[in-house]
Image (tube, rainbow, N blue to C red):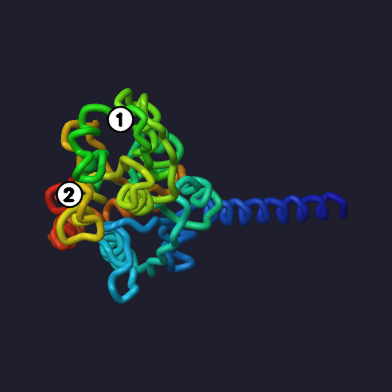
Amino acid sequence: MKKILALILTLVMAVTLVACGDNAAKTDSDAAYITDKGTLTIGMTLFAPMDYMDDNGELTGFEVEFGKAVCEKLGLTPDFIEINWDAKETELAAKNIDCIWNGMTITEERAANMSISIPYMTNKQVVVTKAENAEKYAASLKDAVVVAEAGSAGEELAKANPFFADANYTPVDSMAKALMDVAAGTSDVAIVDYVASIGSIGEGTDFENLVVVETEEFSPEEYGIAFRKGSDMTAKVNAAIQELAADGTLAEIAAKYKLDEVLSVK
């Protein structure tokens, strides 16, 4: 009798372990987790032309339309959540968001800590100042007050590039805030993504007196979408991106926001 009970107990434990293993496998699949809830929670910040509010107070922009198109391919509902860019990786790991999709520059460090999609757009950092100061700051940034978004590629440049060595750097919470500070005269120079300068500064914009300082050329960059490390959702999104590129949808969205020349997936 004891042998029979021991055998039954062993079988029960084996079944339990198999069930636990199956559940663990499901839990480990990021794609299954996202698909089960039916929503892709997208972490982003507001900066035109990627993610911004239109005149009707509706969220729009290249990344918004791009995200919606990818989600439609995957049968998911996009949910755009504004985050603190400096805390983006913490938000992702905590599952407060499912991906970082907001003109995120691919770096070696980020690629080591997260799963990143295929590059979809090229970019570079640019220096923006008031038109009357362009010649002055093209020569030197000595004692200039420089701002960039905390946790951004612009901040990394401000801290590492010799051109900014004699400047006074201060982080701000967004690229939009960096541009506003320069326009208001509380800062002298902003470091922003090139794509953020397209349609955001100069004639016909809210920052008509701001210009890109053309003297300095910084290393080219690429944008990618970041998922949790080891996520199997990345491959699904990559496939959707390639489909949208192949049928012309992605190029059409990019052209709408004057970004077709910097689109890298065609």
Provide residue 51's location: percent of width, then percent of height: 32, 60
* Disc 1, SS: loop
18, above or below 112, in the image: below
Residue displayed at 42% across by 53% down: 99
Quickly name the residue at label 2.
Answer: 263
For mark 2, does the 10 Å Cα neighbourhood hold few (<14), some (14 to 19), or many (20 or more) residues?
some
Determine whether 146 is above or below 236 in the image: above
Comparing 25 with 88, the one in front is 88
Q: Is residue 238 left or right of residue 96?
A: left
Q: Position of residue 158 (x, y in %)?
A: 36, 32
Residue at position x 21%, y 43% in the image: 122
Seen from this angle, which residue lies furthest right?
Answer: 2
Which secondary structure lies at badge 2? loop
Using the rendered image of the protein, determine whether residue 234 is visible from the camera's viewpoint.
no
Task: Specify the amino acid type for callout 2.
Answer: Leu
Q: Quadrant of the N terminus?
A: bottom right
Q: Quadrant of residue 52?
A: bottom left
Label 1 sits on residue: 141
Q: Position of residue 232 (x, y in %)?
A: 41, 50
Q: Picture quarter containing residue 249? A: bottom left
Three-letter amino acid code at the position of disc 1: Leu
Q: Is residue 253 left or right of residue 35?
A: left
Contact between marks 1 and 2 (CB within 8 A): the answer is: no
Sequence-wise first label, 1 or 2: 1
- x 66%, y 55%: residue: 15
